[in-house]
């Protein structure tokens, strides 16, 4: 567990207000029995469902065998509501893993509750300081994940995301990194977003777009795919124009493989896929089975690691599924 550098925890809880924080603390008491000290850069998000019906929690992570690592704990940082060994980030070789950053104080209390612009600026400033600890900057950022508050009302949630993205575009250099956005319920009262990411120091970054992708529904200003050395980062791919969850999953996988090909990658290079889907609770298990079946049909026999999470909402009208990916291939000069 000491090799675990990045941890994502998706959990289900129906309560509200301070009950959510207490639930997270109880869950974390259990997680801390297994985690090393110092621990990983962590992101914990309250979602609508785990992979199977009645599951309450799912986790995934990234570990390294490399001893070329540095824990990133900048002085300008927030802290959790209980003592934990979590890290704000890790520098491993030339990669920076940034844990989920929020607009909070040193006691885990939300700063500027409900104020989306101020919270986004605070969150980005915390990320900037994690990068600074690694002698890095925004120009090295290759992947961002933005989890935004979604209370079940799609139009209000999308307006919130638009405000968040406006601040992100003002802050980051152009073109932006690859991007994945999805709605969640957040941990601390008053929070409206959480952001984590990956940066790569000193590598030659090549942003790619698949032929015909200008007609896809996407979020302007961010790369569809980015290649740095052996690594290909692919942001959230979707196809909301397709009618059903099945059709959208098929179209999204086709598009994802086209972006991978534009980055000179092969399906065999895929090592991690994340699927975020919006579905009805009654059909959650069936939806999961269909998603796994369809994704598998597009992949070789040696398939990548797969995480599937049901979320309250996604960025586009009519969108039921979003898929992002990491591929590692042979080095191309």
Image (tube, grey):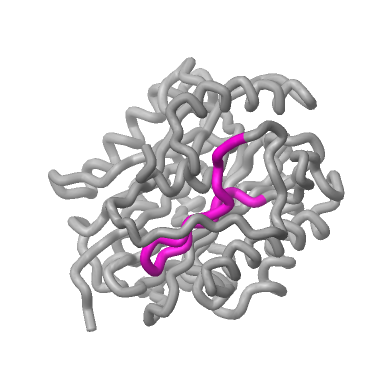
How far from the left and from the top, in percent, is residue 25?
64, 25
Numbered marks: total = 0
Is residue 330 placed above or below 36 in the rendered structure?
below
Residue under the image location 57 percent in, 29 percent down:
48
Return the residue nearer the eye: 150 or 252. 150
How far from the left and from the top, in percent, is residue 47?
58, 32
Is residue 227 placed above or below 242 in the rendered structure?
below
> Which quadrant of the structure image shows residue 4?
top left
Give the quadrant of the N terminus. Answer: top left
Question: Which residues are the magenta region?
Answer: 84-101
Residue 99 covered by magenta stretch: yes
Is residue 50 placed above or below 99 in the rendered structure?
above
Residue under the image location 63 percent in, 61 percent down:
127
Residue lying at the far left in this picture: please name it. Answer: 301
> Which quadrant of the structure image shows residue 15?
top right
Residue under the image location 67 percent in, 71 percent down:
169
How far from the left and from the top, in percent, is residue 262?
30, 73
Residue lying at the far top in this picture: please name it. Answer: 54
Instruction: Give the side of residue 293 with respect to residue 7, left or right.
Output: left
Return the residue nearer the eye: 246 or 68. 68
Residue under the image location 42 percent in, 28 percent down:
51
Instruction: Give the side of residue 141 with respect to residue 79, left or right.
Output: left
Q: Can residue 243 be spotted in the picture?
A: no
Give the quadrant of the C terminus. Answer: bottom left
Q: Mainly helix, strand or loop, the magenta region?
A: strand
Residue 114 covered by magenta stretch: no
How far from the left and from the top, in percent, is residue 113?
85, 45
Return the residue nearer the eye: 260 or 153. 260
Return the residue nearer the eye: 116 or 26. 26
Q: Can residue 301 be spotted in the picture?
A: yes
């Amino acid at each position: 567990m000491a090799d675990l550098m990045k941890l994502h925890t998706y959990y289900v809880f129906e309560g509200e207000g301070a009950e959510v924080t207490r639930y997270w603390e109880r869950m974390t008491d259990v997680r801390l029995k297994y985690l090393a000290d110092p621990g990983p850069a962590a992101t914990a998000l309250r979602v609508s469902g785990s992979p199977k019906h009645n599951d309450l929690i799912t986790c995934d992570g990234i570990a390294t065998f490399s001893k070329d690592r540095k824990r990133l704990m900048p002085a300008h940082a927030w802290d959790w509501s209980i003592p934990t060994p979590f890290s704000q980030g890790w520098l491993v070789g030339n990669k920076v893993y940034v844990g989920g950053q929020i607009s909070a104080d040193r006691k885990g209390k939300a700063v500027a509750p409900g104020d989306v612009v101020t919270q986004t600026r605070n969150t980005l400033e915390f990320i900037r300081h994690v990068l600074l600890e690694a002698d890095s900057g925004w120009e090295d950022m290759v992947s961002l994940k933005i989890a935004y508050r979604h209370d079940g009302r799609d139009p209000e949630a999308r307006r919130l995301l638009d405000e968040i993205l406006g601040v992100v575009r003002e802050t980051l250099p152009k073109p932006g990194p690859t991007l994945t956005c999805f709605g969640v319920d957040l941990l601390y009262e008053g929070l409206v977003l959480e952001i984590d990411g990956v940066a790569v120091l000193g590598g030659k970054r090549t942003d790619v777009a698949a032929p015909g992708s200008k007609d896809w529904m996407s979020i302007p200003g961010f790369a569809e795919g980015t290649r740095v050395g052996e690594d290909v980062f692919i942001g959230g791919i979707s196809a909301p124009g397709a009618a059903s969850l099945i059709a959208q999953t098929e179209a999204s996988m086709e598009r994802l493989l086209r972006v991978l090909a534009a980055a000179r990658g092969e399906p065999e290079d895929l090592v991690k896929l994340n699927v975020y889907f919006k579905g009805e609770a009654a059909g959650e298990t069936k939806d999961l089975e269909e998603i796994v079946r369809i994704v598998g049909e597009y992949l070789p026999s040696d398939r990548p690691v797969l995480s599937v999470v049901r979320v309250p909402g996604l960025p586009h009208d009519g969108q039921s599924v979003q898929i992002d990916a990491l591929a590692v291939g042979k080095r191309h000069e």
